[in-house]
Image (tube, rainbow, N blue to C red):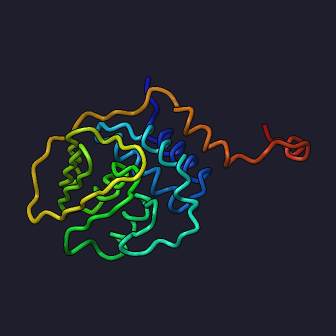
Amino acid sequence: MSLSRFEMFSLCRKAARGAGYDWGLAEEIGTACIDLCEQGIDPTDHLVAFLKTGVCRSSEIPTWPPAQKRVCPFFVGCGIFDRGGISENLIISNLYAPILLCALLKRQVGTTWRVSWKNCVVTISNSVIKLEGDPDVKGGCQVSIELLETAVDLEKSARKFPVREPAGLLEFAAKTYVPESEASRARGAG
């Protein structure tokens, strides 16, 4: 049996919070991971590898367009939405885990996107993500984001949720737990 939708959301949200994101963005990350699972794409390896980079704890203030040495896919997705979308194609260098960005772009209803990097092309239309190629990248890479003028009919893949909780996500999630103490036990905690 695989993880439920809520278990996956909770685990990814806690892992993002444990990695240093605030709770609001951690919620977005949890939702993005569920969106990928709903599209038949297991995001756990991508999320764990990304969180291990420590990009979210960078002291650099995000600029637009992003120009940092290591660029966060969630800051890019939120940046696109905060600006009401994009009016021209966008190329971003040093973007980590671009498949995670695709989950955020999926939420902009009525918009068709093509996102490409290294050996992968992702088309997003009518809330469906079509993945062609290998989305895995080690480190940052150059990503092209195109806004397409017409919608594309895409067939949705079968849902794919992990069978067990990935250890890497559990490690980050554990950072959100309060350490046990005599005082907490006296109040009835675990």
Q: Is residue 126 above or below residue 60?
A: above
Expressed as whole percent of the image width and height from the top left, the position of residue 78 reads 40, 66
Marker count (numbered) = 0
Residue positioned most to the top: 1
Expressed as whole percent of the image width and height from the top left, the position of residue 58 reads 56, 63
Q: Is residue 47 left or right of residue 158?
A: right
The N terminus, quarter of image: top left
Residue at figure coordinates x 62%, y 39% from the top left: 171
Residue at figure coordinates x 22%, y 39% from the top left: 133
Q: Is residue 91 left or right of residue 174?
A: left
Residue at figure coordinates x 40%, y 58% from the top left: 73
Residue at figure coordinates x 23%, y 47% from the top left: 129
Expressed as whole percent of the image width and height from the top left, the position of residue 188 reads 83, 41
The C terminus, quarter of image: top right
Q: Is residue 152 left or right of residue 46?
A: left
Q: Nearer the viewer, residue 91 or 104?
A: 91
Q: Nearer the viewer, residue 137 or 183?
A: 137
Q: Nearer the viewer, residue 161 or 137?
A: 137
Expressed as whole percent of the image width and height from the top left, the position of residue 180 reads 82, 42
Q: Is residue 83 above or below residue 27?
A: below
Q: Nearer the viewer, residue 119 or 8?
A: 119
Q: Is residue 1 left or right of residue 13?
A: left
